Structures are given as C-alpha cells and as structure tokens.
Amino acid sequence: MQLSSRFPVAVQILIIIAWCPEDVKVTSEALAVSVNTNPVLIRRIMGYLKKAGLIAISSGTGGAKLTRSTEEITLLAVYRAVELTDQHALFGLHAHPNAYCPIGCRINDVLRPPLEEARNALEGALAKVTIQELLSSFPPFDYAILKHLKL
C-alpha cells in the first residue's frame, strides 16, 4: 500500500515558495509546472496548507507566501496538514469487526498499540526536519528559471 502523494507535493510547494524571492508571484499554475501536475491538485493541496496556517494565498494571481519562517515549518506540520484523517489517525482500524469472531472481536485492541508506536516513530522523525533544512539542498534562485517554469 502506498500513501498519497499529497505530502511530497506539499513539501515541494513550500520549498518553491520559500526559494522564490518576494517579487516572484508563486501561483498554482507555476507550481503545477514544477510539480508536473494539474493546477487543480495544487490548489487543493494549497487549501490544506492554508487551512493549517502554513501559507497565505492572495486572491487573483497574487500568489502564495509562507506565514512562518522555514525554520519553523517541520515536515510533521506539513504531514498533519495534508495527510491525516479527521480522526488524526495514520492507520484506519476496522469499523465493524465481527463481534462473535474470536479474532474480529479483539483485532482493533491488538493492532492499536503497534500502530500507535509506528505513528509516533514517524511523527518523531518528521518533527526533526524543517523546510529550511531541505531548502538548503537546492541551488539559489536564478531569475533565468522563470521563463522555463512560468513563475
């Protein structure tokens, strides 16, 4: 089973916004070129990031800006913004196991602790990495790239 691509796309969005100088308008269309996907998907993910308070989006073609410094935005914050369910669960448990089955009646109780441990390990690792750390892995912004990415 593979998780959705929302998380890596959201990270890429944040890195691009941080990478671009203030005078460059980072729009969903421009981001879609970089991510190589549909602008509608980008806008949906940007909506999650905005709801989580990680970005602000100007109306029209004003572009997006970070609402915090790159040192303050962890991968955990991004992950929580775009991947977790409403119950904040990484793994879903069976909603209606058979109460009369000796396995079914206990499966959720037996699975819950190792799944919670896995979630805690993942969140602990993501909390240690910031957008700034990832941003430092890329070359400095070059205005020549604007014509290729349509930023």
Image: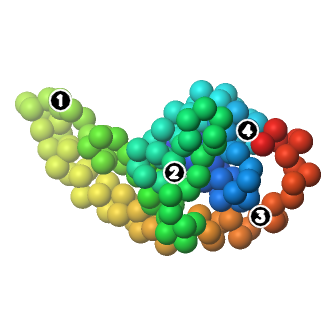
**Mark 2 residue type:** Ile
Inter-mark Cα distance, 3 to 1: 47 Å
Question: Marks 2 and 4: CB-CB under 8 Å?
Answer: no
Identify the amino acid type marked 4. Ala
Mark 1 and mark 4: Cα distance apart in space: 44 Å
Label 2 sits on residue:
55
Q: Nearer the viewer, mark 3 or mark 4?
A: 4
Residue at the disc numbered 3: 138
Query: If you read the primary sequence from the N terminus, does the residue marked by circle 1 or circle 2 appear first?
Result: 2
Q: Secondary structure at mark 1?
A: loop
Considering the numbered disc 4 on the image, is that residue within a helix, a strand or a loop? helix
Q: Residue 70 appears in which quarter of the rendering?
A: bottom right
Secondary structure found at label 3: loop
Residue at 56%, 56% (x, y): give it. Answer: 66
Instruction: Give the distance between the C-alpha atoms of the residues marked 2 and 4, in whole angstroms.
Output: 16 Å
Location of residue 39 with respect to 8 vertically, above or below: above
